[in-house]
Image (cartoon, rainbow, N blue to C red):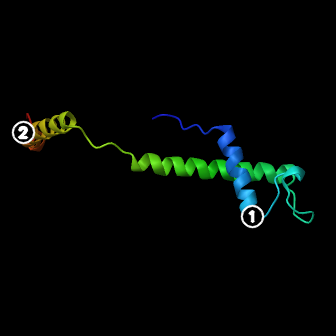
Amino acid sequence: MDMLTIDDAAILKRAKELCERSGLAWNLLSRTSRDMRVLTDRDRRECLMRARDELIRAAEEEDVRRVPAPTAKETTVARTRDKAEQLASPLDEFVTAAPARRVA
């Protein structure tokens, strides 16, 4: 399984979007009014973590939706394997169900 990586710029962009949606300013330069609350360093780190979690969750959900359908060759191999298991299983049951002989 491939390791999921999210670009730092995408995380920062998403964090700033979350702040804007909440009516908060990321820093002094981004505030639109004098009474707007500006995030502290701790608040910015928390916002970055939330943005990262959202992006990872969205990427995982998208990846789950993109599960490829089996190819014709994979389907044929699976059917052949299933038939081989069906043929082998009655014999296996007989061998394991046979009682052990006792020698006196």
Residue assigned mark 2: 87
Q: Tag 1: Cα neighbours inside 10 Å, few (<14), some, or many (≥20)? A: few
Q: Tag 2: Cα neighbours inside 10 Å, few (<14), some, or many (≥20)? A: few
Residue 58 rendering spot, x and y as whole percentages: 54, 51
Determine which quarter of the picture holds residue 68: top left
Secondary structure type for disc 1: helix
Quadrant of the frame with the C terminus: top left
The residue mark sitting in front, 2 or 1, is 1
Determine the CA span between mark 2 and mark 1. Answer: 64 Å
Tell me which numbered mark, 2 or 1, is placed earlier along the sequence.
1
Q: Are marks 2 and 1 in contact (CB under 8 Å)?
A: no
The amino acid sitting under disc 1 is: Ser
Residue at screen point 59% across, 49% down: 55
User: Is residue 100 at least partly visible in the picture?
Assistant: no
Residue assigned mark 1: 22
Residue 19 rendering spot, x and y as whole percentages: 75, 58
Quadrant of the frame with the N terminus: top left
Report the residue that reaches farthest toward the front.
32
The amino acid sitting under disc 2 is: Leu
Residue 13 rendering spot, x and y as whole percentages: 69, 47
